[in-house]
Image (spheres, grey):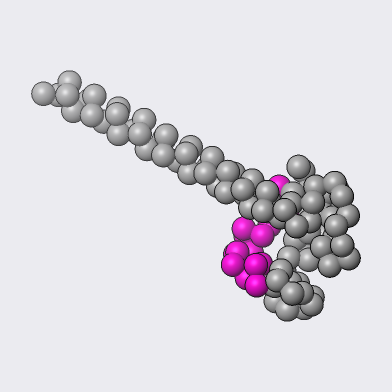
């Protein structure tokens, strides 16, 4: 019986560690997925229109500031204000960081 308890304890520890790792990976995957959605309108390399400026090569601080200004209606927009309000400030920071590196 003690051997079975030991095996169960080890299995629980391994499962918990795996769940934490999966949660971190899911967060990165979610950020990457959101970034792909950004590129649909803002392109990854081309200039589409004045209302949809390209985001490739823009630093994280500039992107984050723009997203927060859109979220708080300090920057005029047609759709981006509504989109950015769907994310927490932390999510917008993660998105800006990701976009600035990819």
**Where in the figure is residue 69, as x and y percent of width and height?**
75, 72
In this orientation, does residue 3 appear?
yes
**Is residue 11 shown in magenta?**
no
Residue at image position (83%, 49%) is 56
Residue farthest to the front, as pictured: 48
Vertical arrangement, residue 67 with respect to residue 10, above or below: below
Residue nearest the observer in this picture, 12 or 57: 57
Vertical arrangement, residue 67 with respect to residue 60, above or below: below
In this orientation, does residue 97 appear?
no
Q: Quadrant of the C terminus?
A: top right
Vertical arrangement, residue 53 with respect to residue 16, above or below: below
Residue nearest the observer in this picture, 79 or 59: 79
Occupied quadrant, residue 12: top left
Residue at image position (26%, 31%) is 9
Majority secondary structure of the magenta segment?
helix
Q: Is residue 45 left or right of residue 33?
A: right
**Where in the figure is residue 88, as x and y percent of width and height?**
60, 64
Q: Is residue 23 left or right of residue 62?
A: left
Residue nearest the observer in this picture, 94 or 44: 44
Query: Which region shows up in magenta?
Result: 82-98
Q: Quadrant of the N terminus?
A: top left
Residue farthest to the left, as pictured: 1
Residue at image position (79%, 51%) is 43
Q: Is residue 12 left or right of residue 62?
A: left
**Where in the figure is residue 61, as x and y percent of width and height?**
80, 58
Residue at image position (22%, 25%) is 6
């Amino acid at each position: 019986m003690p051997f079975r308890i030991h095996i169960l304890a080890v299995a629980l520890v391994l499962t918990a560690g795996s769940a934490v790792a999966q949660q971190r990976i899911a967060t990165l995957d979610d950020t990457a997925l959101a970034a792909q959605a950004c590129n649909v309108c803002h392109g990854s390399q081309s200039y589409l229109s004045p209302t949809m400026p390209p985001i490739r090569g823009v630093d994280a601080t500039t992107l984050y500031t723009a997203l927060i200004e859109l979220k708080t209606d300090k920057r005029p927009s047609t759709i981006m204000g509504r989109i950015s309000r769907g994310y927490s400030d932390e999510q917008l920071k993660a998105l800006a960081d990701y976009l600035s590196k990819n």
